[in-house]
Image (tube, rainbow, N blue to C red):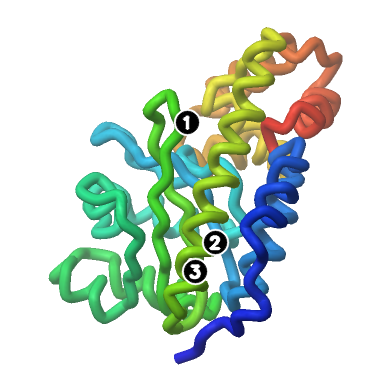
Amino acid sequence: MRGTPLEQLAKPEQMGSEIAQLRTQFDVMRFMKRKAQVFGFRYFMIARVPGMEVSSLASLSIVSNVPVEIVNHYDKIGLLQSSVGIKRLRETTTPFQLDFDEWRRLSGQQEGLAAHIDVLRAHEVEQADYFPVHFADGSRAVVIFLGGRHQFSMAALMELQMIAIHVYNRLAEIGLVLRDNGVELSDREIECLNWTAAGKTSAEIASIIGLSEHTVNHYLNHVTRKLGAVNRTQAVVKAIRLGYIR
């Protein structure tokens, strides 16, 4: 159990000014990695709260440094549809924590859960902290911090909530600016570009996100034309510059 020294906590006006300077999703990634480390977390994820028809965590992620092995395993065994965390996000706007004991208790004998907990423990994750957020257009999302078991002071929790709110709103503002510039990419196009940026081939991307290789090629060719790029590599560079991918 540990707290965060009050002297480590940022002044609200300082943090607001810093977040306002973030220009791309890559800027957000660096800021969030730094903040996660300050509070003793290993990873973070900013993700959309899914509708009932969505079954892939990878497709919901906006900005994240969660290892791909964790996300792939989570999706492979289909935990999203019965996720305790997602269920609670649909019921509350209040921040909450989930550790493995509560996850097991609330999930019962859910198939694959024990194996996924082993994957999380291999990456030194024992607990997740959820901070629900929303934007003026009504879109809902969540900022999740993952790491060891911990207990924070009320002041630290309030700062984490403030970080979550301001960073998500900044991401939304970045997206609105891009739409005003006439460039709008679909979630699937962004997902395929993200994996391309990670060095994955079309065949590998197809396997990861559960589509055919032909469909992945369609998305990548379409987004390349949409961005006015001559090839996929240039499309990735342009998407990073615009802030669509990290």
Q: Which residue in the protein does label 2 denote?
A: 69
What label does residue 152 carry, if any?
Answer: none
Is residue 22 positioned above or below 235 on the image? below
Question: Residue 229, position in %: x, y?
Answer: 82, 15
At x 44% / y 59%, what residue is drawn? Answer: 73
**Alpha-carbon distance for marks 3 and 1?**
29 Å
Disc number at residue 146? 3
Q: Secondary structure at mark 1?
A: loop
In this picture, residue 90 sits left or right of residue 169: left
Q: Nearer the viewer, mark 2 or mark 3?
A: 3
Q: Is residue 145 left or right of residue 64?
A: left
Which of the two labelled residues, at mark 3 and mark 1, occupies the earlier sequence position?
3
Which quadrant of the rendered structure holds the N terminus?
bottom left
| Mark 2 and mark 1: Cα distance apart in space | 18 Å
Image quarter of residue 4: bottom right
Report, in whole angstroms, how far the alpha carbon at label 2 lies from the one at label 3: 15 Å
Q: Residue at x 46, y 40 (%)?
A: 60
Which of 17/186 is in front?
A: 17
Query: Which amino acid, by three-letter code, is at mark 3?
Result: Leu
Amino acid at circle 1: Leu
Q: Residues within 10 Å of mark 2 (few under 14, many from 20)?
A: few
- Dot 1 surroundings within 10 Å: few (below 14), some, or many (20 or more)? few
Q: Which quarter of the figure is the C terminus placed in?
A: top right
Earlier along the polypeptide chain: callout 2 or callout 1?
2
Q: Secondary structure at mark 3?
A: strand
Residue 96 in percent (x, y) is at: 33, 64
Residue 4 seen in the current view? yes
Residue on which disc 1 sits:
211
Where is residue 39? Give x, y as percent: 59, 74
